[in-house]
Amino acid sequence: MTTQPTAAEPFTTIIGLEVHVQLQTKTKLFCGCSTTFGAAPNTQVCPTCLGLPGSLPVMNRHAFDLAVRAALALDCTIAPFTKWDRKNYFYPDLPKGYQISQYDLPFSSDGRLEVIDPKGALWRDVRIIRVHLEEDAGKSMHDEAAGTADTRIDLNRAGTPLCEIVTQPDLRSPQESRAWLNELKLLLAYLGVSDCNMQEGSLRVDANVNLHIPLAGEGGADGRLAKTPIVEIKNMNSFRSVERALVYEAARQWEEWQATKAEMGNTPKQTRGWDDAAGVTRAQRHKEESSDYRYFPEPDLVPVTVSEADIAKARAAMGDPPTVLRKALAEKWRIPAYDADVLVNQGRDLVDYFEDLATRVGEGKVASNWMQQDVLRTLNERGGTIGEFPVRPEAVADIIGRVTKGDFDTSRGREIFAEVLASGRPVADVVASMGIAAVSDDDLVSLCKELLAANPKIVADVQGGKEQAAAGLIGQARKKNPNVNPGKFRQMCLDLIRGM
Ligand SMILES: [Zn+2]
């Protein structure tokens, strides 16, 4: 997994990601408090998540099962025996003075998740070191009350179940890092493990990045590498920020290295915070080493055992992950890989909508074209989910059916689609009210004969091999009757001319 530096970039960017994902559970990891987002501060707390003396944690098995499902989908090995540890540190939003996490025996390890580039080829196969479970801390709110420098603490989030996913430093560019995060988010949404909403803090990403710079010895490259110190970037609040921060940080490290050209060895890891408005990273306090956390086994919780039956159950609940679904959809409906990719990337509900439509239409590619050109485009403009989209698959299938029958052409079909969307009325009503009556074959033939008689030059041109001359007849036909289906009319004219 090595990438040679390109001429444009005389270094290789080495990137690893640490992702925290909030699991989609109703209650917290070690108590029964609600995890619903947006409640008034400190209304979803109890003695356990407040860390009051005498309270005891009890593990939420559903959270554990969801985490196992995620780890299995990430190709991880599930440990048959796993335990909890206390990670000790002092921070105002951590009332217990420690966080319950997993240290030396995480519940899963050694996974992988591929990312595909925009052309559909494998971009990177990213190894995952481990996935473990832990509880979230509370939230400090700084300077929110105008005119004061108060910091207030909201502990509603304390104890919320988080999965921490740590990758090997296998990513090689900011662009593929962002694409990988999108793939991870999509996978977790398909699994029903997390909604991955970054605005609500359901997904947080830290990135580790440094540069490998080949050193040129006498007579050319001699295989030695200079490595810039690893920087951990924090405070990125969107995948776009992750990409921007990595682009900035790689350039910053390159500039810094050029000033010294040192063969930097084991320089300690640095932490920098991303300032989205300024578009820069800034130095922060150094991160604690794990020894500073004085990890020790959590005495109030029993270790967890995971049986083969538990794993089989989690696998059964998984469903097809996006990578499998893309291939399956392309094969089943005979649609290009690109189409399958577009559909799958929109989520499971949209795939269900498409399959419903394709089943009714009986033709995958036609259904896929309507999905992309009409349903998806409109959905993106309007916002909202496919579940709320007012034009249901049966209506789209109705319109497609009428186009296939030759009642009207695709562009007229689009107008009808737009009108069904705007008015919420059934397709048949809209067709009737728009005055789109299908022109009967007899009427079409007589119109055709009339125009051929009136246009001997066009007839002669077509007979001389210039089929495109027939286009001149379509405009005239639609002037006489706007409901004429151009494709059908053109074909009929050509057939009549050939029969002359
Ligand atoms: Zn609680």
Image (tube, helix red, strand yellow):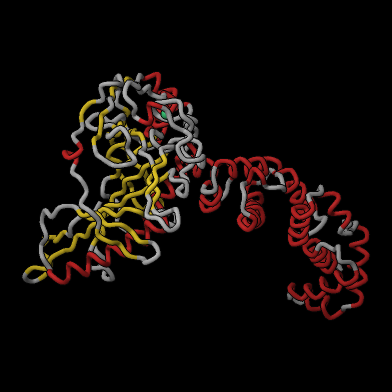
Q: Residue at x 34, y 33 (%)?
A: 133
Quarter of the rendered structure image containing ligand 1: top left
Q: Residue at x 50, y 33 (%)?
A: 319
Residue 463 in percent (x, y) is at: 79, 74
Res 369 seen here: no
Point out the residue furthest to the front here.
147
Q: Residue at x 40, y 64 (%)?
A: 277
Point out the residue furthest to the bottom here.
457
Q: Which image quarter: residue 100?
A: top left
Q: Is residue 121 above or below residue 359?
A: below
Residue closer to the observer: 76 or 132: 132
Res 337 seen here: yes
Residue 297 in percent (x, y) is at: 23, 26
Say which quadrant the C terminus sits in. Answer: bottom right
Q: Which image quarter: residue 490?
A: bottom right
Give the left or right position of residue 334, taking residue 434 as reference.
left
Q: Is residue 183 above or below residue 158?
A: below
Residue 120 in percent (x, y) is at: 44, 54
Q: Is residue 281 above or below residue 336?
A: below
